[in-house]
Image: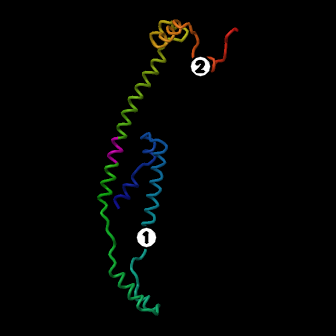
C-alpha cells in the first residue's frame, strides 16, 4: 500500500520539465508509468476474485469422482513458488549506481563542453571583422597556412588543391 501512495504522490509533469530530460527518456518514463498502471489494474482485478475452489460443487456435478479426488489432492498439496528477488534487486541497484555515475560523468562533460562553447562564442563576438585582419594576423592564428604558401612559392606552384573543383576554373586563358 505504501508504494501506491508514493507512486500517486509523484508529480510526473514536474519531473519531465524540471530535470531537462531528453525525449527518449521522457518517452521511456511514460511507457513505464503506463505499464505500472496497467499492472496495478490487473493486480487489483485478480485480488478481488475468489481464490477458493468449491470441491463439493464439482462432486455433485461430475460423474467421474476420481477426477475430483485428484483435483482436490493437487489443490491440497499445492504450495506457491517463492522467489528470492534479492539477487535481482542487487543487480538493479548495481545498474542504477552505474547509471547515476555515468549520468554524473556526462553532466561534467557537458559542463566542460558548455564552457568551451561559451568561450568560443565570446571569441566570435569579440573578434575583429574579417576585412580588418592582416596577413600577419592570419599567419599568427594559422601558421600552417603560411607554411603552405612558402612551400608553394619555393615550388613555383600557386594553385590550391580542390579549388577548381569547388569554385571552377577562373583563369584568363
Residue 173 against residue 79 in the figure, above or below: above
- Residue at image x 31%, y 51%? 93
Position of residue 132 measured from the top left corner of the image (x, y, whole percent): 53, 7
Measure the C-alpha gap from mark 1 to mark 2. 73 Å
Which part of the image, by quadrant, shows the C terminus? top right
Residue drawn 47% across the image and 8% down it: 137
Front in this rendered view, residue 161 or 24: 161
| Residue in the foreground of this view, choosing between 124 and 56 | 124
Most foreground residue, 133 or 115: 133
Q: Give residue 46's mark.
A: 1
Residue 74: quadrant of the picture? bottom left
Identified at 44% across, 62% down, the residue is: 39
Q: 84 above or below 17?
A: below
Q: Is residue 97 magenta?
A: yes
The quarter of the rendered structure image containing the N terminus is bottom left
User: Which residue lies under the disc numbered 2?
Assistant: 162
Q: Secondary structure beneath disc 1?
A: helix
Classify mark 2: helix, strand or loop: loop
The segment highlighted magenta reads 96-101
Name the side, left or right, on which 167 lies relative to 61: right
Q: Is residue 21 above or below residue 84?
A: above
Q: Is residue 83 magenta?
A: no
Does residue 101 appear to the left or right of 20 in the view shown?
left
Amino acid at each position: 500500500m505504501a508504494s501506491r501512495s508514493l507512486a500517486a504522490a509523484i508529480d510526473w509533469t514536474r519531473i519531465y520539465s524540471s530535470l531537462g530530460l531528453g525525449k527518449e527518456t521522457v518517452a521511456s518514463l511514460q511507457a513505464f508509468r503506463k505499464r505500472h498502471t496497467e499492472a496495478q489494474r490487473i493486480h487489483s482485478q485478480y485480488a478481488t476474485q475468489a481464490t477458493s475452489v468449491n470441491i463439493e460443487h464439482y462432486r455433485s456435478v461430475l460423474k467421474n469422482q476420481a477426477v475430483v479426488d485428484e483435483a482436490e489432492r493437487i489443490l491440497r498439496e499445492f504450495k506457491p513458488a517463492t522467489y528470492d528477488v534479492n539477487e535481482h534487486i542487487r543487480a538493479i541497484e548495481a545498474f542504477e549506481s552505474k547509471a547515476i555515475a555515468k549520468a554524473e560523468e556526462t553532466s561534467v562533460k557537458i559542463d566542460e563542453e558548455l564552457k568551451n562553447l561559451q568561450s568560443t562564442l565570446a571569441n566570435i563576438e569579440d573578434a575583429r571583422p574579417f576585412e580588418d585582419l592582416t596577413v600577419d594576423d592570419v599567419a599568427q592564428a594559422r601558421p600552417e597556412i603560411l607554411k603552405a604558401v612558402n612551400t608553394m612559392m619555393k615550388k613555383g606552384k600557386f594553385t590550391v588543391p580542390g579549388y577548381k573543383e569547388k569554385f571552377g576554373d577562373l583563369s584568363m586563358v
